[in-house]
Every structure is written in structure tokens, then in C-alpha cells.
Amino acid sequence: MQLTTYTNALYEWVRPLITSQKMTQSHYRCCISITDETLSILYVNHANTEIEMLYTNLVHYDKFDDLKLILSGLSAQHGLKEVPTYLLLPPDDYQVLLIDSLIAQKNEITDALSWRIRSLINYPITDACFDYFELPGKKTTARQALIAAVVCKRALLTKWTQLFETSGFTIQNINVPEMAMRNLTATFESDEKSSAFIYFYENLAIFNITREKNIYFTRHIQLAYQDTSFEIDYEAFSLEILRYFDYYQSHWRHPAPSRFYVAGNQSTVDKHLQKLSQFLPSNLQKFSPAAFQLNESNQELLNKNNLLPFGCVLEKANSHAAARN
């Protein structure tokens, strides 16, 4: 599944909501990710293979109503009104459901998928926006593909897109961390070797296995804590990762990933690496943005708060605008 197809499909969820903004072709791109307490923004010029970081910041806020003032100020201060903006959804705002391939004609697959999804979510299917992409077919089942369905509440997407539109931003793409992580590892995948990537949030981790710039496996893992302390149960977490390695090897018949990365909040990622190294393969390492030809200060900024937004803006400069004319 090509990334452009998937992210264009995500955009179609909210295209009817964005009627007043004309999609532009530009080498300048902005990515914004918002959690319950912070707003992360990255503004770059991606004219050629080199990426120039023009502005990056992590802004703390108290309540949702503060965001319009913050965003309006950022748009005006840095001239971002006409810059194509990517919205990176936090993991709590959507679900990724892995579903066995459906027996349906191509023009019927959305209806068939709707019936399958309605039993897997805890709100009415009429309140959901969803799209899907196929994972590479398994070698053990005549290469029948799995389907990854990405599901989000319609009201939530409406809230975000209206906020950005009224704050002076041009939403051009809606993305999820799994695809940003895929963009980051794709830089190294000019061979046939596989990559594994763990990205830690506060209470969960996202785990990807990619090969030849395609996602083969992805999972949200809730972090379990030991009973006697507030420490993450790293041994149990590692056993789950190793089970996913076994699943990948047995179903796709590829060797275990040769590249194995961990990333997350800079204040905790070194601890995650140290603890996981006791249980996981020795090729586990902290993801480094050094491969992206950035100076040391920009690499440090990415490590602090903008690694996944940076993954979003690694896409081809004009891929989305051209598809929406």
C-alpha cells in the first residue's frame, strides 16, 4: 500500500468540511500535533532532498478554548496561512483495527468493512469515519492481505478541522503516527531488510514492522505497570514484542527485523532503551535523525518534541495537492 493513497484517503474523511481553502502546491509544509496539554508545531522547507527547519516549538495550554488564540498567533507570526498543514492525530483519537481480508467485490468492501467495524467499536457506526489500507499478503495463506481499518469519531475530526480553518491554517493532510513512523524508517529501507520501531507515549506504545517502505504489522500496546511500583513491566512488554516478531516471521516468512529503533519523550527514551535492552535483541537502538542531513541543533529539537511531525512532512511535496484538483 502506497503512503500517498492512504493519506489522501484520510483527507477524504473531512474534505466536505474544508470548503473555503484552496489546496496549494508548495515546498513549505507545517505539521501540528495536539495532545491534552501540548501543541507541537514544525514548519519546514522541503524543496530538495535537504530539509530546512524554519520553526519548531512545543506549546503548553490549559484548555481547548486557548488553542484558537495560540494557533491564530502562530499563523500570523510565521506567515502560515497559505502553507499546507498536516494534522497528526494523537493515538487516543483513533483506532487501528487489523481485520482478515474480506470476501467482497471491490465496490462492496466499504459496506462489508462497516459491518465488521461496528462490532469492534463502542459507539454507533453512523458516528464513525473510517478508511482502510491493505497490508502485504501473507505467504502462508496464498498471499491474502490483511486489512488495517483506521477509525475515528466524526465529531472529533469536525472539531479539529473547524479549529484549524478558523485559526488561519490550510489543512491539507490528516495523518496518524503509524505512517509518520513508516516515513522515518523508509529512509533506511533501500534494501530488503525489515525495520521495527517502538514509539513510546505516556501510557501506550506504538509498534511498527516495515519492509521496503510498507507497513507489514502495527499495534498499539497499552503499558502495564508492576504491582509494587510505578515501573513499566518491561519484561512483559518485551515478551509481547517478541511474540509479534514470531508472528511476522511465521506469516510473511521474512527474517526478524535487522533494524530496531525506539523513540519517544526525550526525558524517558534512554531509560526505555536501557530497560528493553535486557530482554530484546541487541540491535535495539535509539532512533537518530542524523540520517536526514540536519545540523546538530535541529537534530536535538527533533529529539525533544517533533520527531513524529517531522515524519509527516517527509512526504513528497506535491503528492496531495495534485490529487485534489
Image: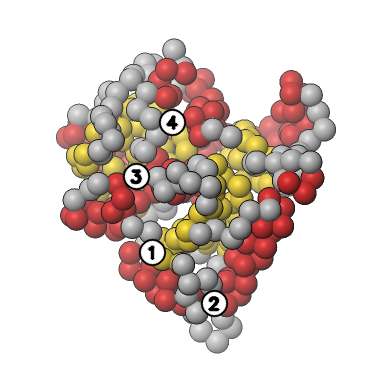
Mark 4 or mark 2: name the one nearer the start of the chain.
Answer: 4
Circle nearer the viewer, 4 or 3? 3
- Taking the image as shown, residue 40 lies to the left or right of residue 218, namely left
Q: Type of residue at label 4?
A: Asn
- Name which residue lies at 74% across and 20% down: 107
Mark 2 residue crowding within 10 angstroms, few (<14) / some (14–19) / many (20+): some
The residue beneath circle 4 is: 173
- Name which residue lies at 25% across and 39% down: 51
The residue beneath circle 2 is: 279
Mark 3 residue crowding within 10 angstroms, few (<14) / some (14–19) / many (20+): many
Residue ranking furthest to the top: 325
Mark 1 or mark 3: name the one nearer the start of the chain.
Answer: 1
Give the structural element (helix, strand or loop) at label 4.
Answer: strand
Circle nearer the viewer, 1 or 3? 1
Q: Are marks 4 and 3 in contact (CB under 8 Å)?
A: no
Separation of residues labelled 4 and 1 (CA atoms): 28 Å
On the rendered image, what quadrant is the C terminus found in?
A: top left
Mark 4 or mark 3: name the one nearer the start of the chain.
Answer: 4
Q: Position of residue 250 (x, y in %)?
A: 72, 57
The residue beneath circle 3 is: 310
Q: Type of residue at label 3?
A: Phe
Separation of residues labelled 1 and 2 (CA atoms): 15 Å
Mark 2 or mark 3: name the one nearer the start of the chain.
Answer: 2
- Taking the image as shown, residue 29 lies to the left or right of residue 120, namely left
Mark 1 or mark 2: name the one nearer the start of the chain.
Answer: 2
Q: Nearer the viewer, residue 202 or 184?
A: 184
